[in-house]
Image (spheres, rainbow, N blue to C red):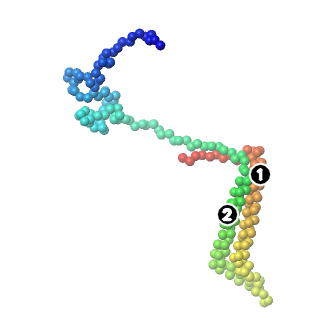
């Protein structure tokens, strides 16, 4: 590849001359290290950087006073997503409803036991039992014994049967409801939800 521009002029002043820091000072100019011109003037009263070791004032563009930004701060927008529940899996609905109904049955049994102990400590069963015995009693028998009928084992057994029935019914109804929801979602599109991020 040949050079078609011909010989270029050489600038001897830059090629062979001294660097700016090595030049001789002009007459009447104090000798010292070379400092480039500053783009911004130093603020009055000195700069934050202080004086240089050679006695000259430090500073420059990096230490010049800057005006604060006055632009309004923009508030970030909360992203929202609109979703639609198109289908509910009957198997997952059955498992969740089964576990929740078992937890509800256990809470029912515990609540019945606590309520029975509180009422027994307050003397409710004895007072009501005496009243019922006097009302239903006669010379031949003592009447209906409420305290023996509402004993703690019998109450817990009855509550456990009710909780077991509740587990079966709640699981079956929830599973059937998921099938019905899937059929209705095929016609109307399902339930729409709008989700938003927390700030």
> Which disc is residue 180 wearing?
1
Q: Residue pushed farthest left? A: 28
Q: Residue at x 29, y 23 (%)?
A: 19
Q: Quadrant of residue 51?
A: top left
> Where does the image place residue 154, in percent across and percent down from the top left?
72, 75
Horizontal side of residue 145 vs 43, given as left or right: right
> Mark 1: which secondary structure?
helix
Residue at mark 2 to residue at mark 1: CA–CA distance:
25 Å
> Where does the image place residue 11, in percent across and percent down from the top left?
33, 15
- Vertical relation: 146 (above or below) 3: below
Q: Nearer the viewer, residue 31 or 9?
A: 9
- Vertical relation: 97 (above or below) 40: below
- Vertical relation: 153 (above or below) 194: below
Q: Residue pushed farthest front? A: 1
> Mark 2: which secondary structure?
helix
> Where does the image place residue 138, in percent across and percent down from the top left?
78, 87
> Where does the image place residue 112, in percent across and percent down from the top left?
68, 71
């Amino acid at each position: 590849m040949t050079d078609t521009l011909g010989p270029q002029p050489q600038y001897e002043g830059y090629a062979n001359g001294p660097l700016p820091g090595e030049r001789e000072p002009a007459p009447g100019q104090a000798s010292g290290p070379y400092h480039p011109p500053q783009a911004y003037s130093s603020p009055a009263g000195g700069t934050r950087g202080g004086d240089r070791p050679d006695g000259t004032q430090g500073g420059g563009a990096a230490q010049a006073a800057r005006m604060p930004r006055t632009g309004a701060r923009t508030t970030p927008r909360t992203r929202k997503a609109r979703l639609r529940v198109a289908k509910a899996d009957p198997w997952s609905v059955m498992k969740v409803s089964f576990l929740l109904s078992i937890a509800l049955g256990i809470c029912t049994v515990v609540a019945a036991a606590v309520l029975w102990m509180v009422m027994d400590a307050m003397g409710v069963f004895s007072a009501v039992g005496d009243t019922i015995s006097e009302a239903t009693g006669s010379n031949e028998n003592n009447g209906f014994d409420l305290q023996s009928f509402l004993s703690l084992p019998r109450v817990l057994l009855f509550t456990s049967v009710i909780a077991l029935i509740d587990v079966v019914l709640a699981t079956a109804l929830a599973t059937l409801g998921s099938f019905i929801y899937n059929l209705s979602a095929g016609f109307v599109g399902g339930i729409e939800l709008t989700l938003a991020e927390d700030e």
